[in-house]
Each structure stands twice: as structure tokens, then as C-alpha cells.
Image (spheres, rainbow, N blue to C red):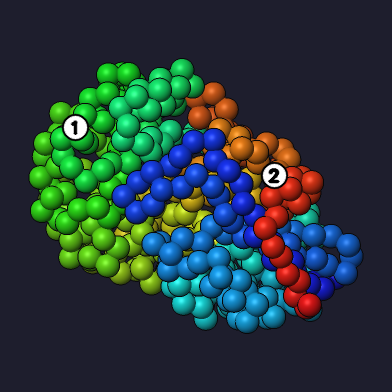
Amino acid sequence: MRITGFEVITVDIPLRMSVDHALAKRKHARNILVRADSDAGQSGWGECCPREYVTGESIASVREDLTKHILPRLVGRELDSFETVTAHLTEILDELARNQQAAVCAAELAVLDLVGRATDRSAGDVLGPVVQEQARYSGVLATADPDEVKERCGFMRKFGVDAVKIKTVITLDENLQLLEIAREILGPDVRLRLDANAAWDADETIRQLEAMAAFGIEGIEQPVPADDFAGMQAVTAAGLAPVVADESLCSLEDAKKYAEGKGCDIFNIRVSKCGGLINAGRIKRVADEAGLRCQLGAQVGETGILSAAGRQFATRCSPIWCEGSYGGLLLEEDITDPDVTVGPGGFAPALTAPGLGVDLLLERVEARRVDSFNLPS
């Protein structure tokens, strides 16, 4: 059995609510899907969410990288075994740059889904065995409007999540108001952490964390710009809250730099920005060796394809926090079966079917298609 070709599809799916933070405002999910086809009539699907402010990638750059640098190396590839295909994907990954992580993720997931289906293996096997039968996901609060904060916190309280990440704004007074509302509605037992999305410098981060001490903040994600390594080191050394590297952490080299240089306490591993499942596992091993922890992150608006990949990581790698699988809670409609949207309490089961563990609802993909091309054409 061999790979005969690929289709690259751009989709656009409206969000049920606006998601706002310091680096972007988003009301639609515009993502790239990749379908890998075999001569046996099987297909596998992958996805990425290009974000220029994260990996430097755009829809256009991902399409170009897939066309010129990635997919031609996979067309005609024999699907002789899960292990040999994984080894070939790793070779491709190691030759690509930091600003090609999302592109290789979409291709990798499609091929892992395809070879998994062909060999009756889970794509998650690249990460190791399932170690927990379900994952528990956090809520995410991404608005500074007081009325919306109250409404969304009220929903999360009723939904029963045990942890919430709050997207902060620039000013301390507004952030204190956010925290006061959230703590009042969510109660004292829900764990709170913050995501500044690179809005501050090190001094401002320390000032704000000191002022927020009474709220019991359990983590501060990407407080300074992604290229401010010294700033990340300074905030980490201050020890006011565990520091999470997100936009700073895309590649394996980033992981090694931050582990060796004590630039954070926690890696935020998002499958799309980190180059797929294989690289997610390698970055997790760097963290383990350095005594650091990991969380599972997500791109805003990812569909059930990336959510399924994230679920593989969540149930095999035991991250301290999980984000994603928001599916029908955030998207106007998701495109996979089964529906992998988190359930009450934020709980969601491990996926055990071959490949990524989900099938595509093709009529929904067609309804959201913006454009597409095939390779070979």
C-alpha cells in the first residue's frame, strides 16, 4: 500500500463567540485540512491552524510549504509499517524550520491517520501507551467585557470545570476587575491561571503578579514577547507563579533552549504550533529530562481533527492542564464523528479507534470549504 496523493483544503467556520486577547481577535476559524489518500482507497486527515504571531505562518505560507517542501516527499511513500512511516516523518520534520511547524503538523497527522487505519494502530502510539482513560479540560475566559465575563464564568461554573485560564489585558486595574469577577462567580476552589499573550515586559509582569497574589494564581503564560528570553528568565526566577512558555515554544530547539536556560517552569504544547504529535512527544521528553511540566494547549477554532490529536496527547502524556476539544461549544459546527467536544466537568474519554480516532463528516467539510488543491495536480 502506498500514498497516491493529497488534497489541501482551506475551511472557514464561524465561532459562536468572539475570542479576544492581546495578540488577536477572532470570530472565525480559518484552518487548513490535509487529506492523504492511498491506492487501497483509504484516506487520513490532518489539520493545522496557521498563526503568524505564533509560528510566523499564514494560510498562504502553509500552502506553499506543503506544495514545495513536504507533500512531494510523501507522495508514493509505501505504508509498509507504522514504525517506518513514523521514522520517515521524523526525518522530514528535522529538516524544516521553526516557521514551518504548522505545515508539517497538517501533513504528519494526515499520514499518521492513514497509516494507523491501514495497520489498525492509533496515531497516538507515537507518544506511548494510553495512561488515563479520560482527560479533564480547563475552561478559557477570553474577554474583558465585565458582562461577558460574568456570563461566561456563570456557564463554566454550571458546566463544572475545575480550572480556568483567563486571558488578561494590559492594564492592572482591568485585570484585577477580571479576577474579582471570576473568583466571585467561580468560587474559591476553581484553579485560576493567566495568559498574557506577550502583553508585558518582565518588570510589569512582576508588578502585576505581586498585586494579584491574593487570587491564588497557579500559572502565568507567555507574559513577555516570544523573543524576550531574558524576560522569561527573569519572571521565572522571581518565583511569583509558575511561568508557561507558549509563543516562545514552537520547535524542539526552542524546548532545549528554554529547558537549559531556565526560561520557564512549564511548556505549553499545542499540536499545531509544535509540528505535530511526533514533535509534541519529543518536546515532552525534553521537559521530563529537565524536571519541567507540560500542559496541552490548543489553537482557537481547531476542529475535531486537531482536538483528536490533542486527546491522544492528553491521555498518553498526563499534562497538568488540558485545553481544547471545545468543538461545538465554540465552533458553529464541528466536522468530525464522534463529537469530541468536552462533556460536563470538562471530562472527555480517550480515543481508541485506529488513526486519530475520528471520521470526517464530509458534507460539513464541503459546506465550509473556501478553496482547495490536489497534489499531484
Q: Which of 104 and 316 is in front in this view?
A: 104
Q: Which of 289 and 94 is in front in this view?
A: 94
Residue at 61%, 46% (x, y): give it: 13
Query: To which quarter of the image does residue 81 belong?
Result: bottom right
Residue type (three-letter) at the residue carrying disc 1: Leu
Q: What is the x, y in percent for residue 62?
A: 56, 70
Q: Mark yes or no: residue 289 visible.
A: no
Q: What is the x, y in percent for residue 27?
A: 50, 44
Which of the two labelled residues, at mark 1 and mark 2, occupies the earlier sequence position?
1
Q: Nearer the viewer, residue 104 or 356?
A: 104
Quarter the N terminus occupies: bottom right
Residue at 50%, 66% (x, y): give it: 58
Residue picked out by circle 1: 176
Q: In this view, does 324 lie to the left or right of 37?
A: left
Q: Is residue 149 left or right of residue 38?
A: left
How packed mark 2 is, by other alpha carbons closer than 10 Å (few <14, some 14-19, many 20 or more), is: many
Quarter the C terminus occupies: bottom right
Residue type (three-letter) at the residue carrying disc 2: Ile
Residue picked out by circle 2: 335
